[in-house]
Amino acid sequence: MKSSEDDRISAGMRRWRREFPDIDCSGKAVVGRMLHLQEVFLREVNRTLAKHRLNYPAFALLATLRVEGAPYRMSPKALLGTLILTSGGLSNILRKLEKAGHIRRLANETDGRGVIVELTEQGRRLVEPAMRDHAETEKKLVAALSPEEQRLMAQALKLLMHAHSDRRAGKRASSRAVQY
């Protein structure tokens, strides 16, 4: 295994420090590696999901409906709250999955203007084996870390996510205040 000194992020940081010694580029040690790993992980995840004729966004939506439990239904707003998608991106995925017969959109009985997204039996049969393969791929992607390192990494990433979701929520709240 390569030492931490000979990966491309470390090499890039050395060049930054040489050319811009007044800039603290220490964030690249984490952010640069996370961006690199995002590409690696997404490529492997999509390779696994391609065997099931899925890509990650479609899989994430179907799996989210499946783990919601019977009757496998959620509102688009609830889906947006769990997925990393824009509302336009969600609409496109819903349209494609509905056309393929994996989901259906139903009128929301409690809100006549709303819609509920439901996983179909065909969608359930597609996503369940994909979920098993996806979980195996995730385990392989982090296998270089011991169980304790995985726990610590998950904890550190959770802290970063909370820090940035709090900032986003604060920005939304302050921008609403300005609009009113």
Image (tube, rainbow, N blue to C red):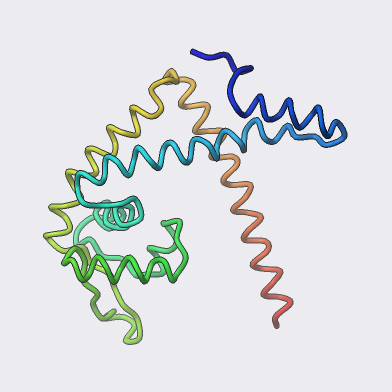
Q: Is residue 30 left or right of residue 61?
A: right
Q: Is residue 57 left or right of residue 162?
A: left
When asked about the image quadrant of residue 106, the answer is bottom left
Q: Is residue 153 left or right of residue 111?
A: right
When asked about the image quadrant of residue 115, the answer is bottom left
Using the image as rendered, state which of residue 111 and residue 61 is in the foreground: 61
Above-or-below relation of 78 to 26: below
Residue at the (34%, 83%) spot, across then down: 111
Residue 77, image x, y percentages: 41, 69
Using the image as rendered, state which of residue 8 and residue 151 is in the foreground: 8
Residue at the (38%, 66%) spot, across then down: 90
Q: Is residue 115 left or right of residue 38?
A: left
Residue at the (27%, 67%) spot, across then down: 96
**Where is the C terminus found, in terms of image quarters?**
bottom right
View extreme (right): residue: 22
Residue 151, image x, y percentages: 47, 27
Residue 73, image x, y percentages: 26, 65
Residue 128, image x, y percentages: 18, 47
Residue at the (29%, 73%) spot, across then down: 116
